[in-house]
Image (cartoon, rainbow, N blue to C red):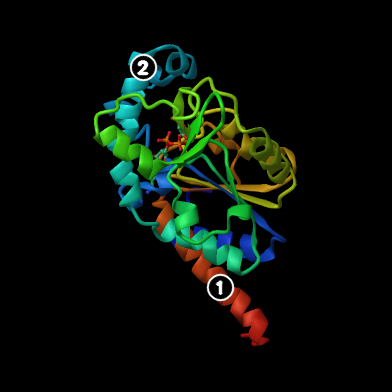
Amino acid sequence: MENDSLADQIVKVANWVTAARGVVIFTGAGVSTESGIPDFRSPGGLWEKYDPDDFLYQKIISSEESRRKYWKMHSELYYTITQSDPNPAHFACVELDKMGKLDCLITQNIDNLHQKAGLPEEKILELHGNSMKVLCLSCGKQYRRDEIQEWLENGIEAPSCEECNGILKPATIAFGQAMPQRETEEAVEKSRNCELFIAMGSSLVVHPAALMPLYAKEGGARLVIINLTSTPYDDQADLIIRGKAGEVIFSIVERVKKEVGKDLSGTTD
Ligand code: APR
């Protein structure tokens, strides 16, 4: 599998995409590193700078000190995320959708870059939420993230709800917090029923998100993993491409566009 040249691998996956009724794409933080947003577990990643144990959901809801640490991390991440632009990995997913080839995009990312690239909301399943929204954990009131950033920069270290004084938290899923039910159920169903599942830029170590490639294989799909480093599901993959997600998926989609274009124009060579 890995002996093929990169060019051969790209042709192979492009042929699989062209032949497939629809493709499910699964993304992790590795697709946003080319936009300048650090991932979590690569050298220099976020979990080298912050301790994930500080951000367990139970700690966030029970300790003001934890909330201060949590909001400090989010405040520092805010400008990195809001000033970052989608990269070819995000745009390739939009192109795939425009060709009618994207079943859905399942993402663990909270950076809103798939939306920023122009992928319709209804095609995106965010398993770990979205950091551009803030919710009150008591009354559910929603705040704009830029509004809360102003509060943080005016010295409020652990914002609380204006309505009910409840705990405010970015609408992301912290470790130990319940997964979003609709998105998770839909992601499992789409993974189990697709023909081709492409996982890219994820270490595939956080469950239940990381089970999606497995559900795809159980459902009879082909599994492609595009990732710079190995993952626990490499042995399940029909093809592994050790490359940068932006370059690889963009090349795959460009080739599919040519194939689809040829069919549409009726030319055969
Ligand atoms: N192209 C391809 N792969 C890349 C690139 C790139 N440009 N940059 C990084 N990678 C790979 C890394 O080798 C790594 O295996 O992407 C993977 C990113 O893994 P993680 O940092 O673990 O990110 P992710 O898999 O999204 O983490 C899942 O963990 O902390 C939680 O909630 C957080 O959603 C996150 C979840």
Residue type marked 1: Lys
Q: Residue sitting at 57 percent across and 36 percent down?
A: 235
Tell me what residue is drawn at x 32 percent, y 41 percent. Answer: 78
Q: CA distance from mark 1 to mark 2?
A: 48 Å
- In the image, is 61 to the left or to the right of 207? left
Instruction: Name the residue at the front extreme.
Output: 163
Q: Quadrant of residue 184?
A: top right
Which is more N-terminal, label 2 or label 1? 2
Q: Quadrant of residue 23?
A: bottom right
Q: Secondary structure at mark 2?
A: helix
Question: Which residue is nearer to you in this view: 102 or 122?
Answer: 122
Specify few, some or many for label 2: CA neighbours under 10 Å numbering under 14, 14-19, or 20 or more. many
Q: Left or right: 130 with respect to 75?
A: right
Establish if 255 lies above or below 207. below
Q: Which residue is mark 2?
A: 66
Identity of the residue drawn at 62% across and 61% down? 17
Ligand 1 image position (quadrant): top left
Name which residue type carries label 2: Ser
Residue named by callout 1: 257
The residue shown at (68%, 43%) is 191
**Of tags 1 and 2, which is closer to the observer?**
2
Helix, strand or loop at label 1? It is helix
Q: Nearer the viewer, residue 211 or 178?
A: 178
